[in-house]
Amino acid sequence: MSAPKILLVEDDRPLRTLTARALRQSGFTVLTAATGAEMWVTLRDETIDLVVLDIMLPGTSGFDLFRRLRRESDVPVIFISARGSEEDRVLGLELGADDYLAKPFSTRELAARVSAVLRRGRGGDPTTWSDAAQPAPDCIRFDGWTVSTARRELRSPSGAMVDLTGAEFDLLATFLGHPQRVLGRERLIELSRTRLTDSSDRSIDVLVSRLRRKLQAGGSDSPIVTVRGVGYMFKAEVVRS
Amino acid sequence: MRLLRRFGLTERLLSVLLLAALVDFAANSFLFERASNFQLRRDDAERIVESLIIASRALERTQTSERGAVAEALSTKRFSLYWSPPTGRPAGSIRLSHLRAQVIEIEPELAGADLELHLAGLPAGGNIAGSVRLSDGSVLQFRTHVRSAWKLTAGRLAGLILPTLLLATFAWLFLRASLKPLRSLVRATRQFGSGTPQPVPESGPEEMRELIRALNTMQERVHQSLVDRTNTMLAIGHDLKTPLARMRLRIDDNSVSPAVRQGLTRDVEEMRLLIESIQAYVESGGNDIPAERIDIAVMAETLVDTAADEGAEARYHGESSVEIIARPVSIRRALSNLIENAIHYGGNVDVAVRQRGAWIEITVEDNGPGIPEDRIQDVFQPFVRLDTSRARNTAGMGLGVPIAHRSVRLEGGTLELANRPQGGLRATIRLPVAPTQPS
């Protein structure tokens, strides 16, 4: 399979050069655009696997450009913002960005995010819920709880936002991808590999107990049950919409 | 009223004075007219003539040295007499010309004696007074009480009091109307600088309107300059991020030695944190993100877990689930700042979320050295750092507590810092409880 083709849209020339180089070093084919207009031309002429878009392009507001891009194409988008504020992140993810990267970022971070989004988008990994054939469900429900995949948010039955760490969210996503199935610790580590760097039985146990505690917060039983000697099971019914 | 509105303070004051003067003038003219036309009943007039003739004839025949005493002796309660040598003679200002004509008609002899009649001054208590000249030029004065003259006296009193009364009333009304807008001005000044400008409606005299206009313009200008400053800081922060991003990627170049890369990466990271704390502080004043229902206990616990995962001594106590209505991003930042401060300055952190009546109480405690009592308030000021040695690894700019404070206040809560009796610092956030969700 040929290297994935990335379109980098960045108005600052030196940064564009540096970012493109970083992506190429990580094994991607990179096309660049300095403006929104250039981006449209490239998108028309080429098959692009992923767009890395700097949100503060001159001329058009980055968000407007982004909205239009989302309307006209379902190419995965990672957006880069200099504001780095949570507001931008939330808004960007809500508009349908696949991921968000704040300036400054390292070569490794960039490559990791791009790879993760590509992996999800291609549907090569059966554990993730966003298969290419079947558009990513934005909303997953179980026991009255709601999970928003775009915003990476968990809401309690009363509608309150319940904070999860990145690892906890990935673990929950893994469970939601395999409801009513017993998952061993090894398997959980394997499936949640996107975020779990310190993979050990012990850390997965800690993570599961934290997640379980949070899902009990509403006073209900936790949907995650321990299967002695084997691992864990997500027993609640999962509804995707 | 509309016309009055266009008048300035000076014009208003002047018009009030003019009105008072006019009333005064009218009252006096009226009084003079009344006095001049005043006549007595025939018998009253005859009594005056009689007494006057008798007295003057008696005095004509008396030695000059005795006249004063004789005049006194001739005086009665209703008709008093005074004699004076031929120097000046007092003449009242309000002449009773008709009465004089009436008297002379009764006794023409008095015309030759140069009779003069006037209304006596109020302090003298009398009403009708007058004088005649004796043959040697000396003066005989008299004063008498005539019951029917009371109307004149009343008129005089009214003439004196009415303009004063009018002046006082108008001055009071005028001052009240003129100063009424001051109250709204004072209110606006008190709220000045907190939030968006509240223009004061223009009212009152022209000078007051001008003042209100000036204040409104000033409000707008100050607000604009604050907005400009905020935008400038955001723009600087934003623009610094791009070169910083370039630096970060340049560091990854293979030609850079690992030691240098490590150092530079740390520097870039510190600069990023500085810029982000400024951005957070500037943005924490007002926030576009709406408040929503959040689980503050889980939020605190998640932050503690994350800190513990990074190797810090962090523990969570308290309830496992407490819901409030707040802006998640800013309140998370507030908690995170306080937890980071505790770990940084105290070496450990104990966080608890508890419900206390209508309030949620969040405590963030450490076992560190605390803060000198006299400096606790300083910590709430932006850009104040208590450790003067920059050598310590401090990523912030002294904005941690100010950002937390602003975020908590935005939710209608309070933030307190206090030294614990057993040592260390305790930060307490109090936030209102969310209303229970109707299901």
Image: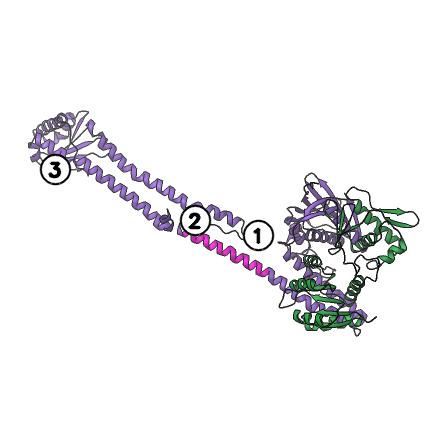
Q: Closer to the N terminus: mark 3 or mark 2?
A: 3
Q: Quadrant of the N terminus of chain A?
A: bottom right
10 Å neighbourhood of mark 1: few (<14), some, or many (≥20)? Answer: few
Q: Which residue is mark 1?
A: B195
Is residue A94 depicted above or below B84 in this figure?
below
Residue A85 at x, y percent in the picture: 68, 59
Q: Nearer the viewer, residue B3 or A55?
A: A55
Task: Residue B203: give its label.
Answer: 2
> Left or right: where does residue A48 sit relative to residue B35?
right
Q: Viewer-proximal residue, A217 or A127?
A: A127
Are the residues tagged 1 and 2 within 8 Å (C-beta)? Answer: no
B338 in the magenta segment: no
Q: Main secondary structure of the magenta part?
A: helix
Same chain check for tags 1 and 2: yes
| Chain the render paints green | A
Kindly report the distance in space between the C-alpha atoms of the residues bearing marks 3 and 2. Answer: 66 Å
- Residue B156 position in % (x across, y down): 24, 35
Expressed as whole percent of the image width and height from the top left, the position of residue B212 reads 46, 52
Rounded to the nearest whole Å, what is the CA distance between mark 1 and mark 2?
Answer: 24 Å
Report crowding for label 2: few under 14, some 14 to 19, many 20 or more residues within 10 A (C-alpha).
some
Residue position marked by numbered label 3 in the rendering: B86
| Dot 1: element | loop
Q: Amino acid at mark 2?
A: Ser
User: From the viewer's perspective, is residue A28 above or below residue A221?
Assistant: below
Q: Residue furthest right?
A: A229
Chain-order first, disc 1 or disc 3: 3
Report if residue B193 is visible in the image.
yes
Q: Which chain is purple?
A: B
> Which residues are drawn in magenta?
B207-229
Residue B290 placement (x, y as % from top left): 65, 51
Marked residue chain, label 3: B
- Residue type at numbered disc 1: Gly
